Image (cartoon, helix red, strand yellow):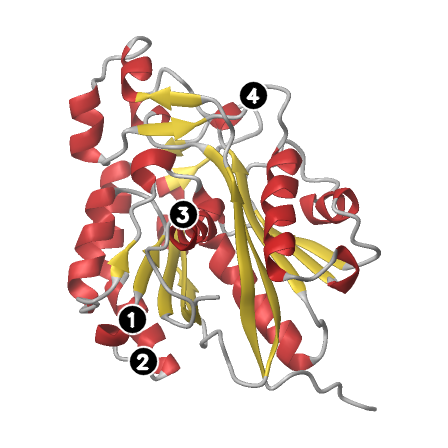
Amino acid sequence: MKVSQGAPGAKILAFGHYQPSNVVTNDDLSKTMETSDEWIRTRVGIQERRIASPGESEIDLAVQGGGKAIAASGLSAADIDLVIVATCTLETQIPNAAGRVAARLGINAPGAFDVNTACSGFCYALAVANDAIRAGSATNVLVVGVEKFSPWIDWTDRATAVIFADGAGAAVVGPSDTPGIGPVVWGSDGDKSDAIIVRDRNSFLHQEGQTVFRWATTSLHPVARQACERAGVDPADLAAFVPHQANVRIIEAIARKIGADNAVVAKDIVLAGNTSAASIPMALSRMIERGEVSSGGLALLLGFGAGLTYAAQVVEIP
């Protein structure tokens, strides 16, 4: 039996992102529930979020974000041989998102599967893409994080309606002579799985905000630091820290504890809301677009959320 041999390393070639055009402000939400712009900004840091139109599917969002990543990478659809979509908000579980996204983008007969670890999904999918390229199972991989949370939210529930939003972020990952994606540090805490849950197909998303806040602010900074250690990177040398965009207070608390004092800290949540699996690639894509980070710098990614699951890795910024 022969064992396939892949590239020495893998790296992110490009990012892309897409947000729906429909902006929902805090003042808009205050008209339908007991809340205010000040209350929302103080507790989660969000000013506005984007919500897809009823006719705009999760697949539509993923195709837009994925197509932009492919275009920015300099590759064509014919160069992609694996598509991984990270999502937890599909309307139905069959068929998967990845196969439909690939077909819409003109990617012919790729491997195609979905990953559902909710808000940590992009980091999980990126780790799988990295391993597939290094093992020789794939050459170029499209990784998409996408969510359409709006149908899964009770828009009278202040605990969730002010937080979650819709959007897509994507990355193209290709072979490299040297590693551009560090070892993943991942895990889960299933004992707390009820903290973020959709109980059945007729239910809305339920979140125990204080439980999640305490877990995130006390348990995740060691994961982030371990990802730096495994990559051989001093946190002080990071150009960017891009955590899941869950809550500004969570982001700031973790950033203080990891010692990434020189890093630009992503706070895309302010204008995008919490887009779960889409939040990390969308945030970094927008940072690159705005010129806040430079090509070749190192970014620490940290995904965490429902499950409860987490994953972190250091990547080279394309």
Residue 307 visible to an observer of this rendering: no
Q: On the image, numbered disc 1 is attached to which residue?
A: 238
* x and y percentages locating residue 228 in the rendered image: 32, 76
- In contact (CB < 8 Å): disc 1 and disc 2: yes
Q: On the image, numbered disc 2 is attached to which residue?
A: 233
Which of the pair 161/31 is nearer the observer? 31
* x and y percentages locating residue 43 in the rendered image: 19, 34
Three-letter amino acid code of the residue under disc 4: Ser
- Sequence-wise, the earlier of marks 1 and 2 is 2
Q: Is residue 147 left or right of residue 46?
A: right
**Element under label 2?**
loop
Q: Which residue sits at x=17%, y=64%?
A: 257
Q: Which residue sits at x=32%, y=16%?
A: 29
Quadrant location of the N terminus in the rendered image: bottom right
- Sequence-wise, the earlier of marks 4 and 2 is 4
Compared to residue 310, the image places residue 24 above or below, namely above
Q: On the image, numbered disc 4 is attached to which residue?
A: 53
The residue mark sitting in front, 3 or 4, is 4
Image quadrant of residue 263? bottom left
